[in-house]
Image (cartoon, rainbow, N blue to C red):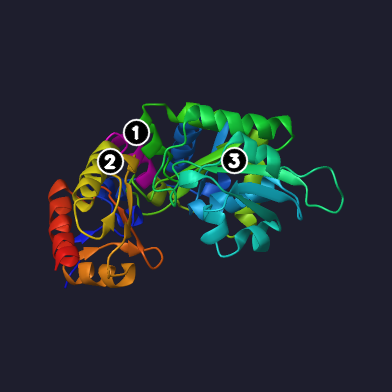
Amino acid sequence: MAIEVDLYSDTVTKPTAEMRRFMCEAEVGDEQKHEDPTVNLLQDMVAELLGKDAALFLPSGTMCNEIAMRVHCRHGEEMIAHRTAHPIHFETGGPAALAGINVQGLDGPRGQFDFAAVEAAIRPDNRHMPRSRLLWVEQTSNLGGGSVWPLEKIRAVVDVARRRGLSTHMDGARLMNAVVASGIAAQQWAAPFDSAWIDFTKGLGAPVGAAIAGSREFIAEAWRCKQQMGGAMRQAGIIAAGGVYALRHHVKRLADDHVNAKRLAEGLATLPGVSLDPATVETNIVFFDLTGSIGAPAAVERLLSRGVRMGALGPRTIRAVTHLDVSAQGIERSLEAAQEVFTG
């Protein structure tokens, strides 16, 4: 059966007709020579949005993370992150292979740790141990169920890191979801960090790209890494235009995704064999556990046979993510399919 409602991830979004037209009409030039006006515009927009000196357009959010590690750390040093961090699980060993660093994973509910955990994790000055160098925070937390870090909690963990001489980095893959959910501006979220980035290919709906921001010195070094890692492009304005359009037109509408995620969670929570507290759904990600006889992989297959795609994360956990290609009607269709699967 064809997929009617795709809740596998917000990375499956396709550019709207208006975005496609805007991309086709974009002015272009050689971005390596800083002559692509659309790339330059996007970088200026992101630098202003995040309150940093400068920004750099990159092909992916993974490259943003890997470049941040390379710029902030020397080989053999250590990054501190939550144990669910994207670089630990989904960047093909990039911290070791590309940055040459160790990663220490911290525990904490819903993808978040507190200042006491950071304080305890920072290594003493001992030549037998890796040197603690970078604190990494993901906003929102993907494997934390799209949870929004409270601003005071972020400030507290960053304060510990700064006091102990660490650099700080924010993975803002879904930062704009946090902005819309909290009403707190992106610049406030990014202010405590030395570097931060946003992704254009998730809820913002662009087909390619992300942008990282920081001091001019940081971006100069990031450019060297981008060049070395094969991320430098030429007439990249065609794809950067998707990010420009997304920032202008697709931020406020993230609220619709949050409403749809809450409705999905509320409907799923009523079904037998589904364990889910809708109050935990803050943005566009819905995690739920299965307590009945059916496991997650089988449930996902049965949903797919009914035209609804979700993702199995382990034997008993399913993730569903709302985005601009999922309507309120699509949510109701998904709940109909779930009703058949979990009550059949």
Marks 2,3: beta carbons within 8 A? no
Mark 1 secondary-structure assignment: helix
Residue type, numbered disc 1? Ala
Displayed quadrant of residue 176 = top left
User: What x and y, as percent, mark residue 287?
Assistant: 34, 53
Is residue 305 visible in this depiction of the protein? yes
Residue in the image at 44% along x and 48% along y:
144
Image quarter of residue 26: top left
Q: Which mark is residue 240?
A: none
Residue 252 is left or right of residue 123, and the answer is left
Query: What range is drawn magenta here?
Result: 241-252
Q: Are marks 3 and 1 in contact (CB under 8 Å)?
A: no
Q: Residue at x 31, y 61 (%)?
A: 290
Give the secondary structure at mark 2. Answer: helix
Q: Secondary structure at mark 3?
A: strand
Q: Which mark is residue 258?
A: 2
Q: Earlier in the sequence, mark 3 or mark 1?
A: 3
Q: Are marks 1 and 2 in contact (CB under 8 Å)?
A: yes
User: Within 10 Å of the Cα at label 1, are there few (<14), some (14-19), or many (20+) other Cα atoms?
Assistant: some
| Distance between the alpha carbons at the discs numbered 2 and 3 | 26 Å
Q: Nearer the viewer, mark 2 or mark 3?
A: 2
Q: Amino acid at mark 3?
A: His
38 magenta-colored: no
- Please provide percent x and percent y for residue 191: 55, 28
- In-front residue for pair 294/150: 294
Residue topped by disc 3: 169
**212 relative position to 21: left or right:** right
Q: Residue at x 29, y 62 (%)?
A: 310
Residue bearing the label numbered 1: 181
